[in-house]
Image (tube, rainbow, N blue to C red):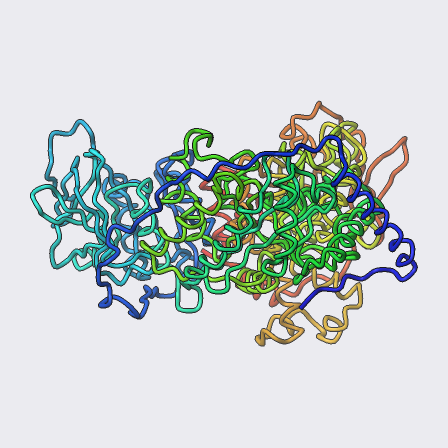
C-alpha cells in the first residue's frame, strides 16, 4: 500500500510550478555544474573472510522443538532483588544493564548489615535474588543468611550468584562452605560447551567453542547428583566440570545458579540471560523471535568520492536477496534527502540513477529535503522542505509504503520539537519513527519507546558504522573492534536483548569496502550458529504495534531534563532554553488533606523561595507528574517556573500515593528534595471523606457515612473506589517504598502535620534550614486567626488566610468509626513506626500513641 500524504488543494497549483523549478534546478546543477568531478573507477572492496561456525556439521536434532521450562514461585511479585558489592562496581552495572534491557522490575542495593524487607501483605516482594559476590553470600551475618534462605525456601525463590578465583590463593580445590560442592579455582579450560539443561532457551544446547586464550582464572565445579552443569568446561586432561552450575536445592532447600565467571564471556552472558528468563518468564512473556530492520540513512547525501556507485547498488540488491536466507522477507529501508540527488561525481551520479531505477525493490522513507536539523526551524519552514522532499518522491516514483520517517541525527524527536511532529503528520501522515536519544544515548540497553502526538517512537540501535567508516583498514581502533562486536559483543547482544532492533546505517557504509554488508552477513551467521533465535522482518507499522502491545507501560513518555544531557541541550528547539533555572528544587508531595497548601503558602514568605505560577483548574498545584498535564511535555512544565530564586518548588499533594509519580519525578528532577507530611491516617481518611461531601460528590453524598464506604468490598463498585481514595494516602510506608526506589532518604524531609498546625513557624524554620536557606523570621510573618481557627500569613500588617475550603469545620468522628479506621491502619502505622525508628527519624506523637494503643 502506498501512503498518500494530505496536501491542501490550494497548494497544488503553486507546488506544481515549484516542482518544475526544482527539476530545472536538478538538470542544471546535475548536468552542468562546474564543481562536479568526473570521478574515477572504484577499487574492488577488500576481501575479508566471513565467520564460519565451529560446529556447523554437528547434529542438534535431539534438542530441537523441546518445550521451554520456567521456574514457578509461590506468591511473589515479579521483581528482582540485586545485592551488589558496590553500586559502582563494573560487573554490577553489567547485571543492571541486562535487567534494564529486559524490562524487569528490580531493586539494587549495596550489601550491608541489614537486608531489605522481603515480604509485604503476605506476599514475597521478589521472585529472584541476585547476589553479585557468592563469597559475600556465604559469609553473611548468620541472621541475614538465615532470613534470606528461609525466604527463598518458603516462596521457592531461586538465587543467582557469581564467584571469582582468588589470584594469589595457593588452594586449587576448595569445598564450598556448608555444602558438599567442591570447586576448582584458577583453572584454564580448552573447550566451553552448552550442557543440556531446562534453563537454556536462547543458547543452542551442544554448541561449543575451543578457547585459544591462556586465561587461567576460571572457577570450575565438580558435578554430582545434587548439582547440574549448565555450561561445561573441559580442561587439558579431558575432565569435564561445570562453569555454570545449578544447585538443585536438595541440601539446604535453596535452588541456586552459580556462575564461575563474570559476564565478560559471551557464553556466560547468554547463559545468564537464559537463567533470568527461566526464573522470571513464562510462555506468554518469553519468545525466540527477533525482528530486525536495517535503515540506510542519508541516501543521496555525502561528499563526492564517499557515495555509492552502480556496482554498490547491484551488490545491495544481491545482499538483500541473500539476507532472506537468514531473515524471511528481509528488505532494506532507504531514507532519502532529495536535494542531493546526482550531487556526486559521474560514477556516483550513475549510482543514484540505478538506485532510482530499482526503487521498487526497497522500502523508502523520508529524511529532510536538505538533511535539515529540525530543531533550528519553525513549522512553516519544516512544512515547506517536507513538501519539496515529497514532490521529489512523487516525481521519481519512490514507493513510500509506510507512514515512517527518520529525522536526520534524530533531531526534534527527543527532546520533542512539537512543530516537527505537526509537520510530519500534515505532509507525510507519519505515525512511526525511531530514535537512539530516548531517554539517553547511553547506555544503549536503556533505550525505550514512547508515543507522542499520535506518533509511535521506537528505540533505534547503532551498529558501530558511521558516515566516515568506509574501509576495513581505516576503521577507528582497528576492524577487530567490529569483529569483536559481532562475535559475542555489543552488536550480537543488541539483537538478543531487544525484541525489535532498528539499526541505523548510512549510505557510505555500502560504498567502497561495503562494511555494512560484511557486518550484517556475519552477524546473522553468528546468531544462527550460537542461538535458537528466529530472525524476522516486519514493517515499521507492525513493529510499532507489537512493541507497545508488549510494553504498554512505555506508551507515556518519561520526560527528562534536557539541560542535563549535553546532546539534548544541543538540539533543543528555539522555544526552550537552559540559560536559567526553570525546574523545581523541591517537591511537596502530600499526601492530600495533611496541610500541604498551608505549608506551601507559608514557605513562599521566604524571599529566596518561589513557587510555580497558578494553573487554571488546579490553582497552585501543577499536578504534572502522573497527571493529564504530564502529556503536555517538558516545555510546558518548565514554563510554569518563571521566577529564578535560590529554591523553586511546586506542591502537588496528588503525587504521594500515585504509582507513577515517583518514577516520573526522578527522571525529570532526580536531585530535587521532597517533603512528606505525616498525619494520623485515621483523621486524614475522615477529612478526605468530608472533603468529598463538601464538594457534593454523588457517591459520598448517597453513602450517608464513611462507615458505609468502608464496608464496600466489590472492587468494581464506585463506593469501593471512594474507599480506596480515603485510605490510600494513609498507607505511608507502602508508598514510601516507591519513592525510595528513585530518591535517597537524605532527599526526603518529614513534617508532623500536628506540629505544622500548632507551630508552623518552628516547622518552617526547620525546613528552610534543611534547604540551606538564609534565616528568616517566620514567627513575625505568621499569625493565628481566632475566627478561622488556624494560622495565616501576615503581609504588611494584614492577615491573609487560605480560602473557605481550607480548615473546614465538620462534626467529630464517632468513637466506633475511629476504632474501625485505627484497625484498618494498624499494620501501616506499625510499619511507619518501625521505619522512622530504624532510620532515627522523629516519630510524631500521634504515631507513638497509635502504636502503643494497639500493643
Q: Residue at x 30, y 42 (%)?
A: 265
The image shows residue 474 at horizontal and vertical percentages of: 46, 30
Query: Can you name the residue that lies furthest to the top here?
Result: 774
Quadrant where the image shows the N terminus: bottom right
- Would residue 614 be visible to someone looking at this image? no
Quadrant where the image shows the C terminus: bottom left
Q: Residue at x 39, y 44 (%)?
A: 486
The image shows residue 101 at horizontal and vertical percentages of: 47, 50
Comparing 841 with 322, the one in front is: 322
Comparing 629 with 111, the one in front is: 629
In the image, taking residue 781 as reference, residue 98 lies left or right, namely left
Comparing 34 with 785, the one in front is: 34
The image shows residue 597 at horizontal and vertical percentages of: 75, 46
The quarter of the picture where residue 162 lies is top left
Comparing 372 with 233, the one in front is: 372
Q: Residue at x 75, y 40 (%)?
A: 31
Q: Residue at x 24, y 61 (%)?
A: 197
Number of on-image labels: 0
Q: Is residue 528 above or below residue 476?
A: below
In the image, taking residue 223 as reference, residue 107 lies left or right, namely right
- Would residue 572 be visible to someone looking at this image? yes
The quarter of the picture where residue 347 lies is top right
The image shows residue 568 at horizontal and vertical percentages of: 65, 37
In the image, taking residue 402 as reference, residue 187 lies left or right, namely left
In the image, taking residue 335 as reference, residue 73 lies left or right, namely left
Query: Can you name the residue that lies furthest to the left here?
Result: 237
Amino acid at each position: 500500500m502506498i501512503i498518500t500524504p494530505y496536501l491542501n488543494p490550494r497548494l497544488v497549483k503553486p507546488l506544481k510550478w515549484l516542482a518544475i523549478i526544482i527539476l530545472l534546478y536538478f538538470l542544471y546543477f546535475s548536468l552542468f555544474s562546474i564543481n562536479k568531478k568526473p570521478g574515477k573507477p572504484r577499487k574492488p572492496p577488500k576481501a575479508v573472510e566471513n565467520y564460519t561456525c565451529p560446529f556447523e556439521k554437528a547434529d542438534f536434532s535431539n534438542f530441537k522443538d523441546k518445550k521451554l521450562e520456567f521456574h514457578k514461585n509461590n506468591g511473589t511479585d515479579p521483581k528482582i532483588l540485586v545485592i551488589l558489592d558496590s553500586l559502582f562496581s563494573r560487573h554490577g552495572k553489567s547485571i543492571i544493564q541486562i535487567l534494564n534491557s529486559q524490562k524487569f522490575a528490580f531493586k539494587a542495593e549495596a550489601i550491608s548489615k541489614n537486608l531489605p524487607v522481603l515480604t509485604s501483605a503476605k506476599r514475597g516482594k521478589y521472585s529472584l535474588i541476585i547476589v553479585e559476590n557468592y563469597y559475600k553470600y556465604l559469609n553473611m551475618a548468620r541472621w541475614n543468611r538465615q532470613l534470606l534462605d528461609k525466604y527463598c525456601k518458603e516462596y521457592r525463590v531461586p538465587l543467582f550468584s557469581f564467584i571469582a578465583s582468588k589470584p594469589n590463593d595457593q588452594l586449587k580445590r576448595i569445598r564450598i562452605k556448608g555444602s558438599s560442592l567442591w570447586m576448582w579455582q584458577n583453572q584454564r579450560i580448552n573447550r566451553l560447551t552448552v550442557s543440556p539443561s531446562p534453563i537454556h532457551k536462547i543458547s543452542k544446547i551442544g554448541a561449543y567453542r575451543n578457547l585459544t586464550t591462556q586465561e587461567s582464572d576460571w572457577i570450575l565445579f565438580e558435578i554430582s547428583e545434587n548439582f547440574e552443569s549448565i555450561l561445561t568446561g573441559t580442561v587439558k586432561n579431558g575432565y569435564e566440570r561445570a562453569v555454570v552450575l545449578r544447585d538443585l536445592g536438595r541440601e539446604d532447600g535453596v535452588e541456586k545458579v552459580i556462575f564461575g565467571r563474570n559476564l565478560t564471556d559471551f557464553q556466560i552472558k547468554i547463559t545468564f540471560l537464559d537463567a533470568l528468563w527461566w526464573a522470571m518468564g513464562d510462555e506468554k512473556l518469553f519468545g525466540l523471535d527477533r525482528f530486525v530492520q536495517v535503515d540506510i540513512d542519508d541516501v543521496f547525501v555525502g561528499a563526492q568520492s564517499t557515495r555509492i556507485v552502480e556496482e554498490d547498488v547491484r551488490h545491495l540488491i544481491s545482499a538483500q536477496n541473500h539476507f532472506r536466507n537468514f531473515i524471511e522477507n528481509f528488505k532494506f529501508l532507504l531514507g532519502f534527502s532529495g536535494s542531493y540527488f546526482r550531487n556526486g561525481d559521474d560514477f556516483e551520479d550513475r549510482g543514484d540513477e540505478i538506485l532510482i531505477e530499482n526503487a521498487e525493490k526497497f522500502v523508502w522513507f523520508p529524511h529532510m529535503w536538505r538533511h535539515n536539523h529540525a530543531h533550528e526551524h519553525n513549522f512553516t519552514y519544516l512544512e515547506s522542505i517536507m513538501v519539496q522532499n515529497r514532490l521529489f518522491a512523487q516525481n521519481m516514483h519512490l514507493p513510500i509504503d509506510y507512514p515512517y520517517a527518520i529525522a536526520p541525527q534524530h533531531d526534534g524527536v527527543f527532546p520533542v520539537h512539537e512543530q516537527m511532529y505537526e509537520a510530519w503528520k500534515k505532509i507525510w501522515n507519519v505515525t512511526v519513527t525511531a530514535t537512539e536519544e530516548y531517554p539517553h544515548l547511553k547506555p544503549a540497553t536503556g533505550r525505550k519507546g514512547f508515543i507522542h502526538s499520535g506518533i509511535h517512537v521506537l528505540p533505534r540501535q547503532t551498529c558501530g558504522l558511521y558516515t566516515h567508516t568506509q574501509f576495513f583498514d581505516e576503521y577507528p581502533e582497528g576492524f577487530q573492534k567490529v569483529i569483536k562486536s559481532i562475535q559475542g559483543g555489543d552488536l550480537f547482544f543488541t539483537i538478543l536483548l531487544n525484541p525489535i532492533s532498528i539499526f541505523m546505517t548510512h549510505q557510505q557504509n555500502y560504498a567502497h569496502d561495503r562494511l555494512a554488508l560484511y557486518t550484517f552477513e556475519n552477524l546473522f551467521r553468528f546468531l544462527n550458529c550460537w542461538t535458537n533465535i528466529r530472525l524476522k522482518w516486519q514493517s515499521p507499522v507492525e513493529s510499532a504495534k507489537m512493541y507497545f502491545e508488549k510494553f504498554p507501560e512505555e506508551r507515556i513518555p518519561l520526560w527528562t531534563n534536557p539541560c542535563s544531557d549535553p546532546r539534548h541541550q544541543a538540539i533543543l528547539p528555539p522555544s526552550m532554553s537552559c540559560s536559567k533555572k526553570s525546574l523545581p528544587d523541591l517537591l511537596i508531595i502530600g499526601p492530600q488533606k495533611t496541610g500541604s497548601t498551608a505549608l506551601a503558602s507559608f514557605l513562599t514568605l521566604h524571599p529566596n523561595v518561589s513557587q510555580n505560577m497558578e494553573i487554571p483548574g488546579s490553582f497552585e498545584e501543577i499536578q504534572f507528574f502522573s497527571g493529564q498535564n504530564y502529556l503536555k511535555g517538558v516545555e510546558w512544565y518548565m514554563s510554569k517556573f518563571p521566577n529564578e530564586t535560590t529554591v523553586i518548588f511546586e506542591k502537588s499533594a496528588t503525587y504521594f500515593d500515585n504509582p507513577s509519580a515517583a518514577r516520573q519525578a526522578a527522571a525529570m528532577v532526580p536531585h530535587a528534595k521532597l517533603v512528606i507530611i505525616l498525619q494520623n491516617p485515621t483523621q486524614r481518611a475522615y477529612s478526605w471523606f468530608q472533603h468529598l461531601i463538601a464538594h457534593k460528590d454523588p457517591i459520598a453524598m448517597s453513602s450517608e457515612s464513611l462507615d458505609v464506604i468502608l464496608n464496600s468490598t466489590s472492587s468494581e463498585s464506585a463506593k469501593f473506589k471512594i474507599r480506596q481514595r480515603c485510605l490510600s494516602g494513609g498507607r505511608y510506608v507502602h508508598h514510601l517504598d516507591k519513592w525510595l526506589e528513585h530518591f535517597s532518604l537524605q532527599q526526603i524531609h518529614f513534617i508532623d502535620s500536628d506540629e505544622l498546625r500548632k507551630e508552623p513557624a518552628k516547622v518552617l524554620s526547620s525546613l528552610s534550614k534543611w534547604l540551606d536557606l538564609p534565616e528568616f523570621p517566620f514567627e513575625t510573618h505568621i499569625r493565628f486567626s481566632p475566627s478561622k481557627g488556624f494560622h495565616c500569613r501576615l503581609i504588611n500588617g494584614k492577615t491573609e488566610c487560605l480560602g473557605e475550603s481550607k480548615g473546614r469545620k465538620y462534626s467529630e468522628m464517632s468513637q466506633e468509626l475511629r476504632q474501625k479506621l485505627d484497625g484498618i491502619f494498624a499494620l501501616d502505622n506499625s510499619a511507619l513506626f518501625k521505619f522512622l525508628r530504624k532510620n532515627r527519624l522523629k516519630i510524631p506523637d500521634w504515631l507513638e500513641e497509635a502504636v502503643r494503643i494497639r500493643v
